[in-house]
Structures are given as structure tokens and as C-alpha cells.
Image (spheres, rainbow, N blue to C red):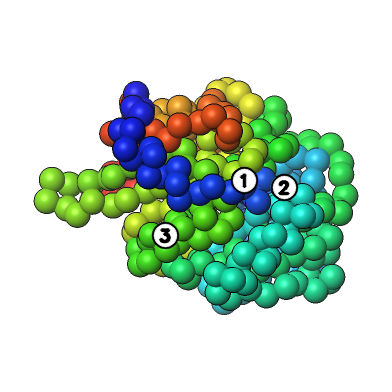
Amino acid sequence: MSRRAPARIIAALKNKAQTMSKIQALAYIVVQSAEPARWREFGERVLGMAAYDAPDGGVQLKMDERAFRIAVLPGADDRYLYSGWEATDERAFEQAAAALDRAGASLRMGSADEAARRAFKRLLSFVDPSGNRHELAWGYSGARAPFVSPLGVSGFKTGAQGMGHTVLPAAQHFEATVALFRQTLGMGLSDVFNFKPAPDAPVIRIHFLHGASGRHHSLALAEMPNPAGCVHAMVEVNSMTDVGRAYDRREKLGVKLMATLGQHENDRMTSFYMMTPGNFALEYGWGGIDVDPARWQPTETKQVSIWGHDFSVGFR
């Protein structure tokens, strides 16, 4: 199981983030696709989400009462574009804008039209030191309608905890990228994992960060490259049965498996991984633990999973 990090490490990590998180959770992700219809099929037939055509020629995937949680934009190639973060409130949005500007994070304030396209009142964008692109939004203004899965999925765990989590590459400027989210935006540290993929391989640092929502982590930063712009994204369903049924659908439809069923050590998520049409993996899971941002003590993971999660299948 996860073990608490040594006291001296905890003290040092605490000193790096004294402010409250300006980020509530991951609100949405934006991906690009040369064939948005592939995401419609993947969303409806594999994930069990509802899919709708977007005015820009793309596709929107709905997984709760909000208009969408995954926006697919038409483009030249298939990749991950933006992580869409929701501010805890309007004051936090304004504080984040000022802090990002001071940090030199290539800040750009979005127009009213740009914010409306994401179904929010206010929007800004920024680039972190590792080159990942982000949006920060406040004031959801889109439609609210009950979610009805075309495949009978019982529901996704969203609400205040957002759509799930995203794991982003930070092969260069890892420490500066972590500092931006911890010191500038106030996210808390849930777990650290010094991953050694082989005995003679260098250590890959992965830091798991939480916002104000209580989800174990909304963001993880991994010291590794990924040409698609994302290591993986995660969505969580309300029952283990939903995970098993999605596993069967993936196999039936020939979607590439990226990791077998297993349970993670740090957040206790039981899940499997599959390839998306965006050339990054998606984790489909159930049972992740919550954290109390005011009381949680960072842990240090010693292994990826308690059982399962054979990632070698993704390289076959």
C-alpha cells in the first residue's frame, strides 16, 4: 500500500505551497482530430457517453448534466490540445490570472465568445514551463440536462470533482512545471512516485496533485515525453460493473488495450487503459479514494499498482 513520505520530505513539500488551491477540478479536456466522427463512435460505443455535433464541425461528449466534458475540434492531426480547469470561484479566477501573469506563464485572457464556446462566463489560457497548454474557466453558463448513456452506463463520478484527471508530460522543466501548479495556483500534493521502469533505466518522477475538489488527483505531471500531448486522461464510473462492461466493449470493438485491469496503489482506482482516437491513453475506472485538501499528508508510492495493470500490452 502507499506509505507516507518521510517527515522531512513532507515538511519541505508543504513549504512549497502555502496558498489555497485556486483550482477546483479538471472541468473538461479539448482534443483535436482529423476525423471527429471517430471520437463520436469511441464516446458512444466504448465509453458510454452521449455525443453531439458541435457548431465548429467537431464533436462534444457529455458524461453528466453539463453540456460536455470532452470537446473534439477538427484539425490536421490527432492529439490532446488543452486541459480545462475550473476555478473555485471568481475571486480565485482573478487571483490566478494575476499570479500567472507574475509567473510569466504566457497568459491570455479569453473573449466572451471564447468563454461561451466552453460554456463558461470567463476564460483564460496559459502555457506551463513544459509546453502544455491549459485553460482556466469560471462560472459555468451552459445547459444543464440529465445524462442518459446510450449504453446504460449508470453514471460517471463528476460534480465538484470534475470530469476526472489528466496526466501530462513534463520531460523538461519538471520542477518549474510542478512549482507553477503548486506555488502559483496552489494545488496540493497527494503523492510522489519515483518510477524506475527497468533496473538500468533512469528514474521518472511523477507528482500527483489535487485541487479543492477532494479527488485524489486531478493532475499528474510525469517526467517523460509524449508526442500526443497527454500521457493519459481518466474518467471514473459509478460501479465496477460499468468498468467490466466497458472492458468487454473495448475487446469486442478491437480498441487497443494499453494496460490490463488492475488497482493502483496511490488512489486505489480499479481500472484498465485503452487507446483513444487522440493517440493518448484513457483510463476507465471505479473506486478512487477522496482526500481532504486541508488535512491530507503526501504519500510516496513504491509501485504502480497493488495488482494487475500490465502496461506491456500497450507495446505489443
Closer to viewer: mark 3 or mark 2:
2
Amino acid type, mark 3: Pro
Q: Which quarter of the rendering shows the N terminus?
A: top left
* Residue visible at 78% across and 36% down in the picture: 148
Q: Which mark is residue 169?
A: 3
Marks 2 and 1, Cα distance to the nearest angstrom?
A: 10 Å
Q: Would you name the residue on which mark 2 appears?
A: 88
**Mark 1 → mark 3, Cα distance in angstroms:** 25 Å
Q: Using the image as rendered, state which of residue 140 and residue 107 is in the foreground.
A: 107
Considering only order in the chain, which callout, 1 or 2, is on the residue closer to the N terminus?
A: 1
**Mark earlier in primary sequence (1, 3):** 1
Q: Is residue 154 left or right of residue 197?
A: right
Image point (55%, 69%), residue name: 103
Q: Is residue 8 above or below residue 1?
A: below
User: What secondary structure is found at the residue carrying circle 1?
Assistant: loop
| Amino acid, disc 1 | Met
Looking at the rendered image, the disc whose residue lies closer to the viewer, 2 or 1, is: 1
Is the Cβ of the residue at disc 2 closer than 8 Å to that at disc 1?
Answer: yes
Query: Type of residue at label 2?
Result: Thr
